[in-house]
Amino acid sequence: MSIKAVQELTGVHWNTIKKLHMEMMEEKLEQRKRELKKSGYKPKHLAVDEFAIHKGHTYATCVIDLDEGDILWVGHGRGMDDFEKFFNEMDMEYLSDVEAVAMDMNASYNNLVEKHMPYAEIVYDRYHMQAQFGKDVLGVVRLNEARQHKKRADEITAAAANEQDAEHKKAMKLDANNERTSYRVLKRARWSLLMNSSNLSEKKANSLDQILSAHCDLALCYAMKEEMCDLFELRDPEEAQNRWTAWFEAGKTSGIEPLVKFATLKEKRLKGLISHARYPISTGKLEGLNNKIKVSKRIGYGYRDDLYFFTLIRYLSLPEVRLSSPKVP
């Protein structure tokens, strides 16, 4: 129920309900903090990520304890000055045992973690990396190939209009239709290219094989995508370093512009990718919590009070709330 719904049900003033709910959440959060402190617990693995709070590219940053699932901090913005507040507001002694922090490749995250927690390893999130590869490499190469088919179809159609020989004209129209068919097939192949090959149905796998057989650049990028997924499964840091280095070298020498650009940029983050072999953590738990955040925003029709909203997010991460899965107040 939203605060307004409770107000209509009870007749209590909106501000009073909000204040009572805020006090209840803060009390629960403080109780959880005391319990963890009493047990001597300290987090070892963290994750940091951003999420949208309003339309118009307004974001907040969230830090989660991956082992316990508690949201440790939520702050407005996603820049360096915004994330710096996390380190200023948190008890750094409580974070002194942190071994690794999972994040995407936002420069403000890794720079500040290196500055304030030099003892922790940075681990770059595999899903952000794979998503970027799918968009910036596979997506670009696929659309480039599709446009080439459309361009050839248009050129053949224009040439066929001036062709006098009937048989030759018929053959040219057939070629143009084949090019348009190839264009449509590539336009629809997005998800087949992005999915893990083991999850494809036999029909989709056969269709994908035909596409890759006819498009060498796309086939190479797809093979690089599959190899990248395998690299994130490695657990030996030395092997991970050797294979990641070879992967980046293959990308840079491929001659495929989007792949060269991607490999050149991401190679700078090699250390954080190798760390995944030692600490196979990700921001997945935060991504899951984003669904709860979206539901709470829908129920409340958005929140103007960021402090209340951020307290609600932290409250939703408490163990008893996660296990009982109640409706968001």
Image (cartoon, rainbow, N blue to C red):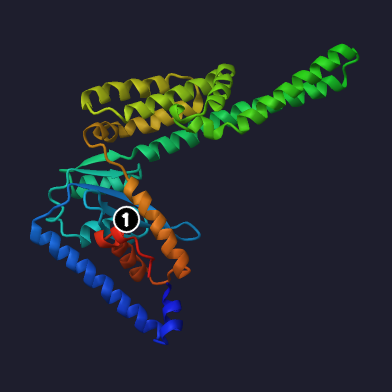
| Above or below for 42 versus 169 | below
Tell me if residue 12 can be seen. yes
| Above or below for 197 versus 287 | above
- Residue 1's spot in the image, x, y percent? 42, 72
Q: Nearer the viewer, residue 159 or 198?
A: 198
Tell me if residue 81 can be seen. no
Q: Is residue 3 left or right of residue 116?
A: right
Residue pointed to by mark 1: 62
Secondary structure, mark 1, is strand
Q: Nearer the viewer, residue 322 or 80?
A: 322
- Residue 99's spot in the image, x, y percent? 17, 43
Q: Please name the residue shown 59% across and 31% down the image.
A: 143
Q: Please name the residue shown 77% across and 21% down the image.
A: 156
- Residue 221's spot in the image, x, y percent? 48, 24
Q: Nearer the viewer, residue 278 or 115?
A: 278
Which image quarter is the C terminus in? bottom left
Residue furthest front in the image: 324
| Badge 1 density bin: few <14, some 14–19, many ≥20, Cα 10 Å | many
Q: Please name the residue shown 18% across and 68% down the image.
A: 31
Q: Is residue 274 left or right of residue 200?
A: left
Q: Nearer the viewer, residue 301 or 259?
A: 301
- Residue 220's spot in the image, x, y percent? 48, 20
Quadrant in which residue 310 is drawn? bottom left
The disc labelled 1 sits on which kind of residue? Answer: Cys
Number of numbered discs on residues = 1
Quadrant in which residue 295 is drawn? bottom left
